[in-house]
Image: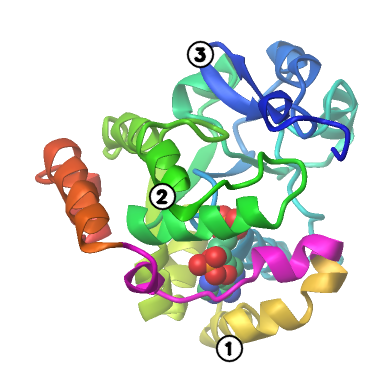
Amino acid sequence: AKNMTDEEKLYRFKGVLYPTLMCPEENLKCLDNIKAREDDIMLVAYPKCGFNWMVGVVRKIIAEGTGNKSEAKMPPLIEFFGPEILKMVEEAPSPRFLGTHFHPDNIPATFKEKKPKMLVVFRNPKDTLVSYYHFCNNNPVLPSVKSWDSFFTDFMSGNVAWGSYFDHALAWEKRMDDPDVMVVTYEDLKQDLSAGIRQVSTFFGFTLTDDQVQQIAGASSFSAMKESSTNSHGNMGKVIFRKGEVGDWKNHFTPEQSREMDEAFNKLLAGTKLGAKLNY
Ligand code: A3P
């Protein structure tokens, strides 16, 4: 990454920007050959909406729900592994735990055919932007951030890795009633994690006792996950588990920027089911 220019760190595939080092073109192309299973457990999120939080939660739900305490490994983001992913997923026993940051239209078609359950995590776009800003500031494989203002502009125009937040949101909005799709929000999880855990485990067909739910909630608090983040995520642990709060945008946005985001939200998502869920 050190030898790459900022321009080289992102490239376009089928119209969407991706990080060159994390998901080179061969990774994305080989996904034409991945085979979905009906009982896959899929986690999907736009970057910085709380993907890693839900990874921790879902891993524990699977461990408790299946009684296999050896725990499913980190779910691979299917776009990270290159041709190796095909072998990895083929050999994995069901239920497989898979993750992606893809826009729904770019999830390989096999998943549309098999219709495994997909848990989608969303977050208020203002806090998502702030989290993404700090992440780009601390991740050498992504373009360095020139300034807060320039990152704001890039985010609003979808000029960031995995593309526009609003494009993702509008595409999921169309699938809010699909029985194989469930959307949870970062804000709801912050407010009542146990309720979220019950909802998610029911969605994936697991029945947990109250004790199990409480235990998972305790182990999935921000402080607990941050504490073990070096084990779970290596050097990126402290970067990913940054602050873990709702409303940090108030420390970053100018009134003008806040208005601009409100306008975008009102134009695109107000009055939609996803918009209502985001409780913006
Ligand atoms: P902040 O940067 O606002 O702190 P992702 O995993 O999709 O990259 O999202 C990262 C964001 O989720 C970060 O937000 C991170 O702190 C937050 N997060 C991770 N684990 C969390 C937890 N257990 N509780 C609350 N927030 C969490």
Mark 3 CB near ligand 1 (8 Å cut): no
Of residue 208 and residue 50, the one placed in the foreground of this image is 50
Label 3 SS: loop
Disc 1 versus disc 2: distance between alpha carbons?
A: 46 Å
Q: Which residue is mark 3?
A: 15
Q: Up-down: is 247 above or below 21?
A: below
Judging depth in this view, the residue of 173 and 113 nearest the camera is: 173
Measured Cα–Cα span from mark 3 to mark 2 = 24 Å
Instruction: Tell me the mark number nearer the camera, choosing from 1 and 2.
Output: 2
Magenta residues, start to end: 233-253
Q: Quadrant of residue 59?
A: bottom right
Which label's residue is closer to the chain start, 1 or 3?
3
Mark 1 neighbour class, 10 Å CA radius: few under 14, some 14 to 19, many 20 or more? few
Residue that carries the numbered disc 2 in the rendered image: 149
- Kind of residue at disc 1: Asp
Are the two marked residues, 3 and 2, in contact with CB atoms closer than 8 angstroms?
no
In space, the residues marked 1 and 3 are separated at their CA atoms by 47 Å
Question: Residue 109, relative to residue 205: is it above or below?
Answer: above
The answer to whether residue 77 is seen in the rendering is: yes
Q: Position of residue 58 (x, y in %)?
A: 62, 61
Look at discs 3 and 2 and give the one toward the viewer. Answer: 2
Q: Quadrant of the C terminus?
A: bottom left
Q: Position of residue 37 (x, y in %)?
A: 66, 29
86 falls in the magenta region: no
Task: Say which residue label 1 marks.
Answer: 211
On the question of residue 124 being in view, the answer is no
Considering the image in quadrants, where does the N terminus appear? top right
Residue 111 x, y percent position in the rendering: 57, 24
Q: Amino acid at mark 2?
A: Asp
